Amino acid sequence: MDNNETNIVLFDGICNLCNKTVQFIIHRDPKSKFRFASLQSEVGQSLMRQIGLPTENHNSLVYIRDNRFYIKSTAVLRIFRRIGGGWLLLFGLIIIPRFLRDLGYDFIAKRRYRYFGKRESCMIPSQEYRGRFLE
């Protein structure tokens, strides 16, 4: 996390919803601002330790930007802000108290495998996007 221009998204690599979220970000990020790592990977685990978050129970997307980290709904809203365009409008939801936003986030996070399914192993990025994933 030495780079001040850091935009790293840590995600649950076996969660279908999380993988779709990564694809969503990639397709709206033509300048390749974002880098990705699964929470299960060595890089993901190392980054989680560096920022002082637990390395198990992967119930939150983590967004690291400018040597700060964000989790749950705040991470999602800050990612929308960074994507820009019309998605920037969703950042306005930041005015809702975090505990209320995170109630909705937690509701979906706890049921994400049931609603969206999960993979047997972490996503393997296509050759086209491999450079966007931290190893």
Image: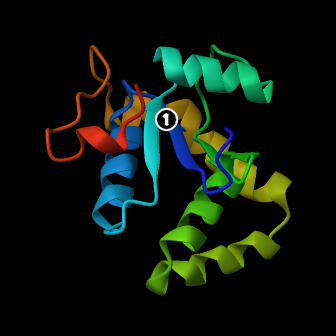
Residue at image position (14%, 39%) is 127
Residue 106's spot in the image, x, y percent?
66, 41
Q: Local crowd at mark 1 within 10 Å, few (<14), some, or many (≥20)?
A: many
Residue at image position (84%, 52%) is 99
Number of labels in the image equals 1
Residue 83's spot in the image, x, y percent?
48, 71
- Residue 105, placed above or below residue 42: below
Q: Amino acid at mark 1?
A: Phe
> Horizontal placement of 56 versus 42: left or right?
right
Q: Residue furthest left?
A: 127
User: Is disc 1 placed on a helix, strand or loop?
Assistant: strand
- Quadrant for the N terminus in the image: top right
Residue 53's spot in the image, x, y percent?
75, 25
- Residue 49, placed above or below residue 112: above
What's the colour scheme? rainbow
- Quadrant for the C terminus in the image: top left
Q: Looking at this view, is 50 or 38 the one in front? A: 50
> Horizontal placement of 48 versus 109: left or right?
right
Q: Looking at this view, is 29 or 61 the one in front? A: 29
- Asked where in the image residue 2 lies, by quadrant, the reply is top right
Q: Looking at this view, is 62 or 29 the one in front? A: 29
Residue at image position (60%, 51%) is 6
Q: Looking at this view, is 3 or 109 the one in front? A: 3
- Residue 99, placed above or below residue 36: below
Residue at image position (39%, 50%) is 21
> Horizontal placement of 104 versus 27: left or right?
right
> Horizontal placement of 121 versus 93: left or right?
left
- Asked where in the image residue 92 lies, by quadrant, the reply is bottom right
Q: Which residue is mark 1?
A: 11
